[in-house]
Image (cartoon, grey):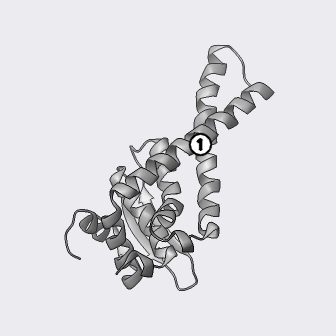
């Protein structure tokens, strides 16, 4: 199936699954529903927060890569909110450690602005990295999205087999 004939939602969910698999998460399942929604479940034990942010942002980046004219911002909305939350928590964790070292409990206005700036930088880094990862694995992403579009659901083993080049 050519990339032009791929459904944006299948591309979106396949992108989450591919990025998760390649970044060390255990992909449990990847699904698209007739209602126009999808879901990819992964376990992230031992996977860095930055890699989790990349996986969260992969859906929209995959759409932009394979079906740019059909990329749906609505598909990305929840993912972006989740990525921002993860990035802000990551930035805040670093600041919290600095606060504790200085004997302080609560961040001031200046620190909150730094949280936001660091979170923004993490999001930009994650978007760039996952876009490069997906582009480097474009044929695999196309196969994964086509199989998901056809079957509607892929288990973790099927995702791993497709990523590994094994026919499913």
Q: Is residue 100 above or below residue 139?
A: above
Q: In the image, 47: left or right of 159?
A: right
Q: Residue furthest top?
A: 102
Q: Residue furthest left?
A: 166
Q: Residue furthest right?
A: 109
Q: In the image, 77: left or right of 146?
A: right
Q: Which of the pair 102/38 is nearer the observer?
A: 38
Q: Position of residue 78 (x, y in %)?
A: 63, 62
Q: Which of the pair 142/152 is nearer the observer?
A: 142
Q: Is residue 77 visible?
A: yes
User: Which residue sits at x=63%, y=26%?
Assistant: 95
Q: In the image, 2: left or right of 61?
A: left
Q: Is residue 58 above or below residue 72?
A: above
Q: Which of the pair 30/3 is nearer the observer?
A: 3
Picture quadrant of residue 156: bottom left
In the rendered image, which residue does mark 1 sit on?
87
Q: Which of the pair 155/36 is nearer the observer?
A: 36
Position of the C terminus by quadrant: bottom left
User: Which residue sits at x=56%, y=40%?
Assistant: 122
Q: Position of residue 25 (x, y in %)?
A: 38, 53
SS class of the residue under badge 1? helix
User: Which residue sits at x=62%, y=34%?
Assistant: 118
Q: Residues within 10 Å of mark 1 (few under 14, many from 20)?
A: many
Q: Position of residue 148 (x, y in %)?
A: 39, 77
Q: Is residue 91 above or below residue 2?
A: above
């Amino acid at each position: 199936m050519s990339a032009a004939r791929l459904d944006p939602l299948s591309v979106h969910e396949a992108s989450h699954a591919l990025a998760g698999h390649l970044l060390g998460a255990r992909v449990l399942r990847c699904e698209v529903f007739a209602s126009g929604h999808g879901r990819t479940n992964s376990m992230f034990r031992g996977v860095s927060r930055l890699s989790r942010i990349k996986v969260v942002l992969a859906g929209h980046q995959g759409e932009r890569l394979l079906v740019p004219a059909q990329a749906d911002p609505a598909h990305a909305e929840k993912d972006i909110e989740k990525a921002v939350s993860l990035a802000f928590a990551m930035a805040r964790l670093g600041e919290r450690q600095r606060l504790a070292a200085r004997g302080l409990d609560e961040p001031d206005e200046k620190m909150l602005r730094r949280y936001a700036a660091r979170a923004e930088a993490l999001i930009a880094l994650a978007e760039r990295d996952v876009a490069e990862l997906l582009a480097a694995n474009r044929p695999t992403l196309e196969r994964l999205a086509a199989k998901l579009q056809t079957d509607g659901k892929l288990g973790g083993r099927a995702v791993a087999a497709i990523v590994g080049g094994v026919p499913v």
